[in-house]
Image (tube, helix red, strand yellow):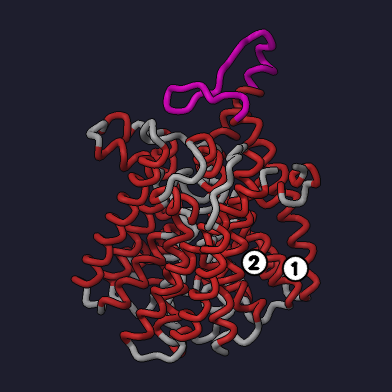
Amino acid sequence: MNYRVLIYILGWVMNFQAMFLLLPSLVALVYKESTGWYFLATAVVTGLIGIGLTAKKPKKNQFHAREGFVLVAVSWILISLISAIPLCVSGEIPHYIDALFEMVSGYTTTGASILTSVEDLPKCINFWRCFSNWIGGMGVIVFILMILPLTGSNANMHLMRAESPGPSFGKLVPKLKKSAMLLYYMYIGLTFIQILLLLFGGLDFFEALCVSTATAGTGGFGIRNDGFSGYSSYVQIVVTVFMFLFGVNFKFYFLFIMRKFKEAFWMEEVRWYAIIYSVATILIAMDIFHLMGGIGESLKHSAFQVATVMTTTGFSTTDFNQWPIFSQVILVLLMCVGACAGSTGGGMKVSRLIIYIKSAQKEMASLLHPNSIKKIKMDGKVIDHETIRSANIYLIIYILLVGVSILLVSLNGFDLVTTVTSVIATFNNIGPGLGVVGPMGNYSTLSVLSKIVLIFDMLVGRLEIFPIIILFIRDTWKR
């Protein structure tokens, strides 16, 4: 382990974190809120520490996959710990574990909240919550790589691989820094378009900004107590469309911009993502038709909830706790499926689901024809053994961690539905589950132990398990 490089890059993470903390300070200045001083003080202290850690660049800059995983995991933990400080010190969220839960939920784009009345919060805190969704959506390290050359191309690849969601990551262009820039250009562009459309729909700039940043990161933090039920149908439809768009693999947009339309539309994962979304929307719309009183309302609410669950955003226009069991089961299954790899969405990812289905088909074919040789392909390309093995290991650890988490959270004494869906919703970075933690509830009544378990689950889910688990392996820390 190259500790000097690790500390050096963590110093840059703190420098950028200090700059991020200045943004809510500016919002507080505009709206004349005293809470902004807490953000400013935290920014100054964080920046001074960061400057001290980056004052001297290490001579030996060896950087391998091990350092990449550790750095990404520690960076996400560090920014969450720092971000929770102004929320706690200001007294808006008095208990630090609650403040930490809120910020981990923000950065991991989960959207699970312990707050009972977000409308009572200062605007600078609501902005900070939504902005954390936006930063976490594309990734903290990806943002830094876009601006700074850290330790070389190999190091950058290890960092991108550790932070980017999905079973594998491919560069859009040969230079990784340019890939990071292209990702953020597309990300910013889509966010800007949504802001304009929401302004056109009658929202003021602050609310349009908060809603758009939370949607872009598929994070789901809202600034209204009633979620999205109080917004106009126009706003709900715009948010539905953009939730779906941010759940698409960003490679699709790159190919589209490069006018490689055929290659873009033949991306197998994107096709299956659209098919699963469409089928689930139609099935739920049919199931809730008698509750909504019209095909238009049924389709609108169904499309919104399928988008918010499948992309792991976490918004809600209605209390789907009251929907028929058939619709609830579909939503729970979609929680596990998630969005596309290379998107801002969470969950297991559609690409992994495709790999598992094709692996099962290959195994069945091998039983019938033992001497046959069949390769698993996606988009016409053979999937290498390492990717398949990694996907299988991911599933095994996923099931084990979910099982242990459910067991620990069950100590709360809540009903089975609340216990199971609270873990699934946080592990897959969705936010609302069912029961007590449903769309009209929150996580405030859970015990400290349960909140710590779910904080761990949110981090593990967003970073695709391996970076966090590696922290607990002794060999990781050997020099």
Q: Amino acid at mark 2?
A: Ser
Q: Amino acid at mark 1?
A: Val
How crowded pointer 2 is (Cα within 10 Å; few <14, some 14-19, many 20+) is rated as many
Residue visible at 35% across and 91% down in the picture: 32
Query: Which residue is identified by label 1?
Result: 409
Residue visible at 26% across and 76% down in the picture: 205
Q: Position of residue 212 (x, y in %)?
A: 34, 66
Residue 323 appears in the picture as rendered? no
Query: Which residue is identified by label 2?
Result: 422
- From the viewer's perspective, is residue 170 above or below residue 83? above
Residue visible at 40% across and 80% down in the picture: 25
Image: magenta residue range: 364-386
Q: Position of residue 308 (x, y in %)?
A: 45, 61
**Farthest-out residue, left:** 200
The reply to whether discs 2 and 1 touch (Cβ–Cβ < 8 Å) is yes
Residue 389's quadrant in the figure?
top right
Name the element at disc 1. Answer: helix
- In the figure, is residue 331 to the left or right of 122? right
Name the element at disc 2. Answer: helix
Residue 161's quadrant in the figure?
top right
- From the viewer's perspective, is residue 37 above or below residue 429? below
Residue 21 appears in the picture as rendered? yes
Picture quarter with the C terminus: top right
Comparing 355 with 154, the one in front is 154
Q: Position of residue 430 (x, y in %)?
A: 54, 62
